[in-house]
Amino acid sequence: MASVKEKVFALSIVLLLSSLAMATAIEVLAQQEMTPEWVVENGEHFVKLAISADGKYIAATTNNTNLLHMFHGNELQWTSSVSCVQSLVMSANGKYVAVGTKGNFYLFDRQNATPQVEYQLDYENSLVAVSANGNVTAVGATPQTPNNNRNSKLYLLEKESPGPTWNSTLLGTLESLSISGDGNYIVASTTQPGVLYLFTKEEATPLWTYNFGEHCRGSKISNNGDYIVAVGGNQTAEKDLRIYRFLRQLQTPNYMKAISELPSVSGISISANGSIFATSYTRSNRLTMFNLELAPYGYGPGSILNVSLPSRSISMSMSSDGRVIIVGTVEGLFVYKYSIPQLDLAKQYATAKPRVIDIASSANGQLIIAAIATGQNDEYSAIYLFDNSKEPQAIITEPWFRIGLLLIAILVASATIVYIFHRRRAPATAADDRTTPSLRTRKSIARRADLSRLCRSDGSLATHLIRKTPRRADSIQ
């Protein structure tokens, strides 16, 4: 068995190593934790966000005051009364804001709180998508309670026209809507039935359609208009769920991959050139990224990467080059960076586990805005802006913090050593005194035993010793 010294030494090493591990773990978390550049908090509940490609202009809507806010940075430019907002987008140049509400569509100029275009839709639920310069807007609408009518409507509006250029009927409930940067191509997807539609801005008749079966949960067209990503299928053995990528010119997909669950509608992103795309899943709390530039065409090592999300995703955004993916969850904001062949968590805002309501980011992924719940019971929310290019300010990674942890470990180890040796050298307890003879008593007993042996072996010596032994005063009768 190990000696006490060996045990104490081993315990000291464990304590020191534990402290070093703790210091390293805290330092990593501190290096990842972002600090907001500014926060807009005014007692409102922000629910929808949009940002220009350069990150200078921000649009936000509230559901407690029913206002559309236009910001330049964190400076409020104007507000406009808009209720029941369901969809909000901003043109890449930041000049126009498109708003879909319950039964209406509005197009705002950045400099004016009065809508430039206003149009009443045929159905209540709406989705909007706008070209990079704001000249072309696609608007979709679907009945709030489908009942026997599960069809949806798609409208194409141009900024200078008083009404839609055309409209088209879509089979199923509209799930997603996107537009190429130049506004020439529009992609819409529906569910029950799950159909993907590709339109040009010139015609109400689709260029082509693709039937997935029951569902087409989401779709996105790349900014250059060359590629389309969609997710759909049946949750049956006949036609499993898959993610597809299409070339715009072809009706059949040039890539497909089986998946285990449908992503959220807001959980699909695609890079500007369409080579990288990602999906987030709310049931399994997972983020999956695909890179079809890697040979052999999306099936090679590192072409599909999965990471576990800390909690359920709410919204996702991707930089135009596909190298930065931002995910807002119910317990924080997380920034992942892709460097072949790895997708790693680079930064986060998650120490207090804030509930993220919506996110948006600039084209390069540097500036990130998030609507985050605040107040008791999350009755309000604030707008946070983060600069992804800045290094987190981590006070706890300073040298004094590490030294402090080491000193604490040394003190704990020293106290443990003192305690163990003190226990070994401690005096006997009262109970021990009654059962264990003291050292003086044990010596006296030993002398008497020796004397007894001498008496038995030599009687004359014993008599002499007895006569010479003086009597104690307390023994005289």
Image: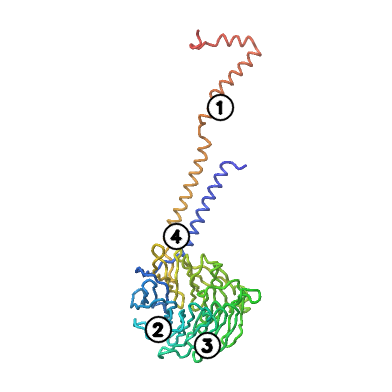
Q: Nearer the viewer, mark 1 or mark 4?
A: 1
Q: Is residue 53 at all visible to an observer of this figure?
A: no
Label 2: how many residues lie within 10 Å, few (<14), some (14-19) or many (20+)? many
- Secondary structure beneath disc 4? helix
Q: Which residue does the numbered mark 3 point to in the structure image?
A: 199
Element at badge 3?
strand
Colour setting: rainbow
Q: Is residue 3 above or below residue 163?
A: above
Residue type at mark 3: give it: Phe
Query: Which secondary structure, mark 1?
Result: helix
Q: Residue at x 47, y 65 (%)?
A: 331
**Label 1 – label 4 distance at C-alpha:** 57 Å
Left or right of 360 in this view: 243: right
**Residue annotated with mark 2:** 107
Q: Tell which residue pokes out farthest to the top in this image.
A: 477
Q: Disc 4 designates what residue?
A: 397
Q: Are marks 2 and 1 in contact (CB under 8 Å)?
A: no
Residue 173 or residue 14, whichever sits in front = 173
Estimate the spatial distance between the alpha carbons at disc 1 and disc 3, rounded to whole Å.
99 Å
Label 1 vs label 3, nearer the camera:
3
Q: CA distance from mark 3 to mark 2?
A: 21 Å
Q: Is residue 213 left or right of residue 402?
A: right
Q: Neighbour class for label 3 at 10 Å: few (<14), some, many (≥20)?
A: many
Residue 376 lies, with reference to residue 97, above or below; the image says: above
- Cα distance between the residues tagged 4 and 2: 48 Å
Identify the residue position indicated by label 1 in the image: 435
Q: Earlier in the sequence, mark 1 or mark 3?
A: 3
Camera sees residue 344: yes
Residue 300: name its quadrant: bottom right
375 w.r.t. 411: above or below? below
